[in-house]
Image: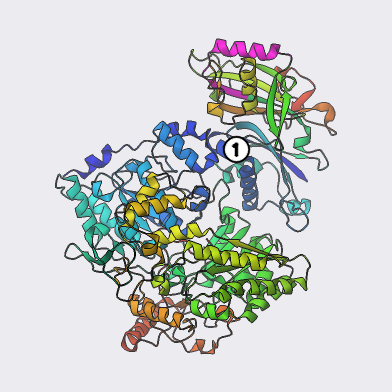
Amino acid sequence: MRLRFCYTKLGKIRFTSQRDVARMWERALRRMNMPVGYSEGFNPRPLLSFGLALPTGAESRAEYVDVVVDDAAWQEAGRTTDDLPSELTGLLPEGIDVVDVEVVERQSGSLQQFVTSCSWLMEFTGVTVAGMGALIDAVLAAETIMIMRERKGRQETDDLRPSIIALGLAEGPFDQGGEAAGRGDEGSPVVVVAELATKPRGVRPVELVRAFVAVAGGAADDQSERWATLGGAAQGTPVLHRACRTQQWIQRDDVPDEAPVPSDPARGDAGAEHVLERAS
Amino acid sequence: MEPLASRMTREMSSLWNQIEPLLAQVTKPARYIGGEQGARTPTHGPESVSWLLAYPDTYEVGLPNQGLQILYEILNEQATAVAERTYAPWIDMEAAMRAAGVPLFSLENHLPAASFDVLAFNLSAELVYTNVLNMIDLAGFPLRGEDRTIDDPVVMAGGHSTFNPEPLADFVDVFVLGDGEEVVTEINDVLASFLVGGDRPRTGDPRADREALLRALTQVPGVYVPWCYEAKFARFEGEGQVGPAERLVSITPRFPGVPDRVEKRTIADLGDWPYPKEQLVPLIEVVHDRLNVELFRGCTRGCRFCQAGMITRPVRERPAEQVRTMVTDGLRRTGYDEVALTSLSSADYSGIEETVTSIIDDPACGGQVSVSLPSLRVDAFTVGTAAQIQKVRRTGLTFAPEGGTWRMRQVINKLIREEDLYAAVDAAFSQGWKRVKLYFLIGLPTETDEDTLGIVELAKQCVAIGRRYHPGVTVTASVGGFVPKVQTPFQWFGQNTIEELTRKIHLLRDAARPVRGLTIRWHDPKATAAEGIVSRGDRRMGPVIEQVWREGGTFQEWSECFALDRWLTALADHGMTLEDAVYRHRTADEVLPWDHVSAGLHRDFLWQEWQDALAEHGLEDCRWTPCYDCGACTGFGVEHVVASAVPPAGGSQGTGQDLTTGGQVPVRFLAEPPTARKERTLASVGATTTHGSSVADGGIEGQGPAGAPGAGN
């Protein structure tokens, strides 16, 4: 049996890496005596598979992990999935809350394979609402946005533009999911919503900032990774302050089994759906 | 008159909002967020003394330190104490902090270090001393003790390196020698009487108030306050003198009532201290990332180069039942799938086989738990135990013969015969291991090139043995330059020069080159020299350490940060030389800078051991043989505590030494009820003081706020 959990990564815990989070999960599952399956071979490892890695420093309301569970031991223990989220939340560090779980087909594809895009909320400083609006328009109007990035030790030039599916200003502050009414005063952080593709290669929030730098006429080879300083040098370019992944999406046509229904009508894309049906 | 007023003026609000923006700019930002499982978030108040426990190296190195975690728990259990932790910020974070004006902070509540009553360092090694200075400076209060007042934190230090406190005497107010478990609350009581409440009148002079506090602390056994002692130096006109002519002639108390000599603290029964009860589980990967349970403290093998073995005597074993409970509870609580049974020589634990088996067979451990013994004895029996516990992940085994020839090993008293090593290696390769690592020291007393090259001979044989089982076996000989350590028989030995160590490394490298499957790795002789500068230095080393730090020399244990030139320049600028500070043999009549602090070992015993070493005379483990009267047991009214009357199979050090006398030697057995034990202890101590040799003897100690309880580190 395979269980798919949806969890958050919010607050201080965002400074841990994806690998750290994997180890937190392994320990939490052992602490609750979950009959996790182990790999065969010389060095058996618990069968956990995580979706797209979240960059260290980014927050998320929609992280996923698949856990292979030994069916016999599971039935013997007489467990149900109902109490798993709250029990696991109690065993995981503050900021990691398990919000949902469902049983998925063991044969169904991996998260990494099927997620096609992610929605992000990003908070910027060093830019006005009007300035950011202009940058967004420039990005959306551009036919190509070429940036240099490193891949497996080699420098490659990529066109980011096709990977920027949606981009816009949020209505409200970051901490309220960008949804609350009323935009902050001029001078307060500007919040942006974006949907970024994960294929052929994932676009990270810092790379979106480099797209802003590029359309503003900045150096395309700036590969600085540090959020707060990135883009800060060029006049009027935004400084990424915080980023939060809010949703991960999969394409319906690619899913072999009956998948949960889309739950975000606002997105207006009938072909895409959440990785997991969210408990409303 | 109003102690509260001054304490309350210290800023006690969280720095998190200033720290958070820095974290986006640094590597491994989770080093600075706290939030580990088991971490406390204590509430500070005027009724409690606040301690900031500091480890002067990176978070990943410092977090697993068991000594610090033990004191963290004990202090937070006190009604009048709260304790938080801090670690040395890495270079990028330090730069960001200094640029943003953020001081050193605690991980729990992110409070500024200077707002604590105590900043207590764990000193496990000498090359971290520049980090100690850097952390005090980052905290933002005066670097030197003489410039501090009652309103500044008291700077303390514990751990193995405090057995020569003098190089840090200018910067550390209070050193604590030996096991910290008991003394930490006694110190807290003294601090509370000065800082908490308000019933103690102040003079109105904050410097005088600080001095009164420091003098009160000298009355706690195990506490050394360098400010209360005067070190006198005089011109030295010895024969053959080449370097500077200043020598230490005395260190004496400046005030009546201050002890001439400070003895270390020793806890009698490890079973009374089942700490840490809630080992911290870090959010990021650290060294020794596993559950650690201390099997015993102390070691009586008597390896003459080994400071830990000398200063932690006598042996005190944890009851086997308590070990099992700590393992089972610890695994359940932490979710770790690996437990290390730590000590200086875990295979010497009386009940090692039964203990390991019971952990592996315990259904509560779920069959997926691996057990590790960080320090393996060199014999086939030990490999058998290792095979039992490492059913999976059988990657590499490590042994430490330390010396290349039997002659050399008699000198250093590591009594391993070649047959023992070959049997161990044979057992390892025959049971599926394909990599064996061997630890050796070079630059040992009386060492000849034959001894040095013996390392390659031994390793070559090990490769040949392995080839019988697998064509692709590898043997790595890891070679460290020997640094003579204080409170050991080799404290008088003049360290090998950088050139000599380099020459020996080249000898080894050339001899090993034609041997397929053999790799030689070595430690940088320059770092060995720097360690030598600090290890046996006197108070004149304080300014040297300060200059190295001011020139940017932090993280000196990290090769990317280390530069010997800073040390040589600082030595020269203060009128000293490597020849005098490091390479020179000390003489029998010389005052040693650490003579006024004691790890319980008689100076006579250490000198006799030094002479025996030069005469190539080995000494058997005293745990199951008659007492050599080193002083550790008798001086503290304790003795070796073992969990089983039967010596471990294979015998100590694998020498096959006759251990059948074990039953008759009056060691204390944990199987007895506590009351009977106590009476018997007193009885045999009485006997010992009378005729001095009937009790199995050894040494004492354990660890201060730092000392890692095992050679595992």
Q: Is residue A126 magenta?
A: yes
Whether residue B360 is visible here, answered yes or no, is: no
Q: Residues within 10 Å of mark 1 (few under 14, many from 20)?
A: many
Query: Image point 76% across, 71% down: which residue?
Result: B467
The percent coordinates of residue B541 (x first, y second) are 34, 56
The percent coordinates of residue B11 (x first, y second) are 32, 36
Specify how the rendered protein is coloured: rainbow
Instruction: State the residue in front, B639 or A102.
Output: B639
The percent coordinates of residue B199 (x first, y second) are 18, 49
Query: Image point 29% across, 53% down: which residue?
Result: B170
| Above or below, comparing residue B115 to residue A200 in the picture | below
Q: Secondary structure at mark 1?
A: loop
| Above or below, comparing residue A32 to residue B644 in the picture | above
Q: Quadrant of residue B233?
A: bottom left
Whether residue B659 is visible here, answered yes or no, is: yes
Q: Is residue B344 magenta?
A: no
Instruction: State the residue in front, B208 or A68.
Output: B208
Q: Quadrant of residue B68?
A: bottom left
Question: Which chain letter matches label 1?
Answer: A
| Left or right: residue A75 compared with residue B255 | right
Say how many tags the image has. 1
The stretch of residues the image draws in magenta is A121-143
| Left or right: residue B593 compared with residue B302 | left
Badge 1 amino acid: Asp
Instruction: State the residue in front, B574 or B173.
Output: B574
| Above or below, comparing residue B496 to residue A131 in the picture | below
Identify the residue position indicated by label 1 in the image.
Answer: A97
The percent coordinates of residue B19 (x first, y second) are 45, 34
- Quadrant location, the N terminus of chain B: top left
List the single residue furthest toward the left: B203
| Left or right: residue B527 compared with residue B599 | right
